Image: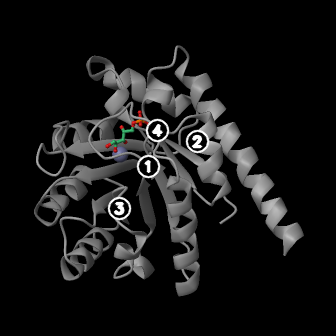
């Protein structure tokens, strides 16, 4: 719970013609994960990358690969990603019923990977309840999934707080990851509410100096998190 905030750069904003170089750059800069956005053109309007990219990245980085599945049929395809070397796999709750969601989480965990579930901006966090006690991580979407470079949806930090509260009420402590529109200012807001892992696409890879941009996001988040922990301990 008191681990430092980790940054998960999303390679959707990297230069695909120089993917190995860009991943090495964020690894050197102290990223905690490599975030891989898999989109199928059905669950979301965009089409991005798939299994071969995960398999290739596994050979060139020692960072954990955080695979975010924005696909209509995660139960069918998630074994492929586990096999390709995903260290954590996130499924969305929207295309799955409660029983399918449980099966997905179990399949991920039984392969030895970390299981995460995500809610789109309009999906209440209560939709996570059937599996919340079994999750290693919860992913709160702070933009509509589909594209990088969108603006942070105001109020998303409230969902982070609600996830933390729900998890506490069950006596569990999954990591909370936030994805979409995260830069130094929004990072501070979500970290103050308990976010542990911050996905950054454009804020890192579209910056002139990605390493400095990554450090700026992490520093802002870390200060906000410490300030909020301090305030909570004083107010308690
Ligand atoms: C959006 C993806 C994100 C995206 C983030 O559907 O899940 O991971 O790449 O990009 P930014 O940080 O630019 O919003
Ligand atoms: Zn993502």
Looking at the image, do the residues carrying marks 4 and 2 touch, with CB atoms under 8 Å apart? yes
Give how far across and how far down residue 94 sits, in percent.
23, 65
- C-alpha distance separating marks 2 and 3: 18 Å
**Ligand 1 closer than 8 Å to the CB at disc 4?**
yes
| Residues at circles 4 and 1 in contact by the CB criterion of under 8 Å | yes
The mark that comes first in sequence, 4 or 1, is: 1
Which element is circle 3 on?
strand
Q: Position of residue 1 (x, y in %)?
A: 65, 66
Residue at (58% x, 56% y) in the render: 196
Which residue is label 4 attached to? 181
| The quarter of the displayed image where residue 79 is located | bottom left
Marks 2 and 3, the one that precedes in the sequence: 3
The residue carrying mark 3 is 119
* SS category of the residue bearing label 1: loop
Q: CA distance from mark 4 to mark 3?
A: 16 Å
Q: Is residue 117 above or below residue 202?
A: below
């Amino acid at each position: 719970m008191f681990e430092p905030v980790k940054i998960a750069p999303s390679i959707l904003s990297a230069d695909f013609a120089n993917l190995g170089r860009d991943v090495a750059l964020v690894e050197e800069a102290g990223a905690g994960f490599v975030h891989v956005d898999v989109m199928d053109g059905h669950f979301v309007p965009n089409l991005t990358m798939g299994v071969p990219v995960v398999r290739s990245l596994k050979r060139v980085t020692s960072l954990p690969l955080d695979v975010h599945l924005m696909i209509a049929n995660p139960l069918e395809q998630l074994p492929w990603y586990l096999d390709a070397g995903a260290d954590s796999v996130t499924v969305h709750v929207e295309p799955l019923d409660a029983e399918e969601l449980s099966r997905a989480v179990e399949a991920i965990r039984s392969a030895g990977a970390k299981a995460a579930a995500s809610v789109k901006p309009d999906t209440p966090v209560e939709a996570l309840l059937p599996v919340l006690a079994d999750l290693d991580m919860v992913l709160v979407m702070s933009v509509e999934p589909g594209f990088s470079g969108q603006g942070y949806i105001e109020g998303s930090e409230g969902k982070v707080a609600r996830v933390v509260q729900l998890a506490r009420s069950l006596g569990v402590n999954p990591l909370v990851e936030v994805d979409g529109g995260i830069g130094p200012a929004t990072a501070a807001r979500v970290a103050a509410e308990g976010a542990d892992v911050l996905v950054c696409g454009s804020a890192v890879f579209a910056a002139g100096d990605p390493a400095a941009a990554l450090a700026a996001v992490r520093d802002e988040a870390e200060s906000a998190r410490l300030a909020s922990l301090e305030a909570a301990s004083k107010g308690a």
